Amino acid sequence: MANVEQLLEEIGNMTLLELSEFLKAFEDKFEVTAAAPVAVAAAAGPAAAGADAAEEQDEFDVILESAGDKKIQVIKVVREIVSGLGLKEAKDLVEGAPKPILEKVAKDAADAAKAKLEEAGAKISVK
């Protein structure tokens, strides 16, 4: 059991970019996917689909579509927004666009990040 705890500790210390790379390598090596299974809305019926649409979305993802002409400025802002991100990780993230910068954040945090990144010259989408 000590190996499992040690592994969890290592994973807990990873940056988002390192964790993303680890997840992709894990999926490739073991030919699995870590995506959650998607429920079929048609099986639940039209009433359930209407209820989902009526609920307001409270978690948003900020996705970097492209860095634009001012890549260095965008890298600086990405490091500001994503805590614990080193220069190399931020550069790799920006150069690998489109990539999620923030995931499952509140609307105001997503809007603030989008505004900062767009001011730096990046193209951003919020989903």
Image (tube, rainbow, N blue to C red):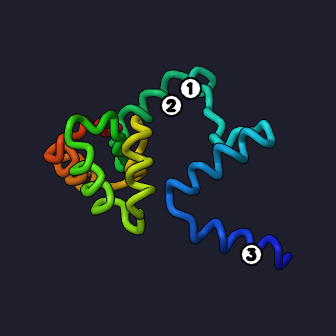
Residue 11 against residue 120 in the figure, above or below:
below
State the image quarter where residue 50 is shown.
Answer: top left
Residue 3 left/right relative to 80: right
Q: Is residue 111 visible?
A: no
For the residues marked 3 and 1, what is the alpha-carbon distance in whole angstroms? 40 Å
First-in-chain label (3 vs 2)? 3
For the residues marked 2 and 1, what is the alpha-carbon distance in whole angstroms? 7 Å
**Which x, y percent locates residue 34?**
67, 44
Total numbered labels placed on residues in the image: 3
Q: Kindly state the secondary structure of the residue where label 3 is placed.
A: helix
Q: Kindly state the secondary structure of the residue where label 1 is placed.
A: helix
Q: Which residue is mark 3?
A: 6
User: Residue at the spot x=51%, y=62% of the render?
Assistant: 15
Instruction: Give amino acid for label 1.
Output: Ala
Q: Nearer the viewer, mark 3 or mark 2?
A: 3
Image quarter where the N terminus lies is bottom right
First-in-chain label (3 vs 1)? 3
**Which x, y percent locates residue 41?**
56, 26
* Label 2 packing within 10 angstroms: few (<14), some (14-19), many (20+): few
> Where residue 41 is drawn, which disc sits there?
1
Instruction: Give amino acid for label 2.
Output: Ala
The outermost residue toward the bottom is 2
Residue 104 against residue 28 in the figure, above or below:
below
Asked if labels 1 and 2 touch by Cβ distance under 8 angstroms, the answer is yes
For the residues marked 3 and 2, what is the alpha-carbon distance in whole angstroms? 42 Å
* Label 3 packing within 10 angstroms: few (<14), some (14-19), many (20+): few
* Residue placed most toward the observer, 80 or 51: 80
Q: Nearer the viewer, mark 3 or mark 1?
A: 3
Residue 97 against residue 8 in the figure, above or below:
above
State the image quarter where residue 68 is shown.
Answer: top left
**Which x, y percent locates residue 12?**
60, 69
Q: Which residue is mark 2?
A: 48
